Amino acid sequence: MFRRKNITIVLLLGLAAGLCAASAVGGPIPTAEQPAPAHWAWQKEFDDVCSRTQDAMAYSIEELTLLIRRCDALLPQVEKLDDTQKKVYKERLRMCRGLYAYVLESKESEKK
């Protein structure tokens, strides 16, 4: 059971990392001379939250809880995107949040 759980976690980590590491959809990447438009403000938070999935097992219960809250806070901003972007980013956010929730649940059950 323990080995199966670890394999599942590794697979989820790899999948979430691959999805969350993909480049932004919706236009050119901003540069120092050409900053991101205001409507991309959520993108930086999204990239930060989802880029941490590779280290999910190393985070404490408190850190995982905070990451889940950050994912939840991003959802309303993702809902405002056009249909294609919303579908992509919503799914990626769901997977990142799901991974953090799974690891959190795993750590809480080990603690008992």
Image (cartoon, rainbow, N blue to C red):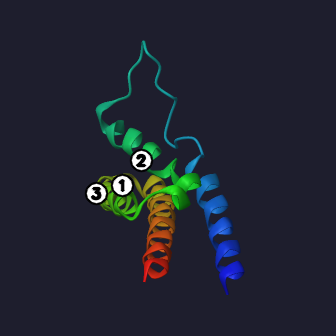
Q: Is residue 46 left or right of residue 12?
A: left
Callout 1–callout 2 Cβ contact below 8 Å: yes
Circle number at residue 73: 3
Q: Which numbered disc flags the more N-terminal residue, 1 or 3?
A: 3
Tell me which residue sits at (42%, 12%) in the image. Answer: 33
Mark 2: which amino acid? Phe
If the image is split into quadrants, where does the C terminus sit?
bottom left
Callout 1–callout 3 Cβ contact below 8 Å: no
Mark 1: which amino acid? Val
Tell me which residue sits at (59%, 59%) in the image. Answer: 16
SS at circle 3? helix
SS at circle 2? helix
Tell me which residue sits at (49%, 61%) in the image. Answer: 96
Instruction: Tell me where residue 64 sits by quadrant.
Output: bottom left
Mark 3: which amino acid? Ala
Q: Which numbered disc flags the more N-terminal residue, 1 or 2?
A: 2
Decide: is 42 above or below 6: above
SS at circle 1? helix
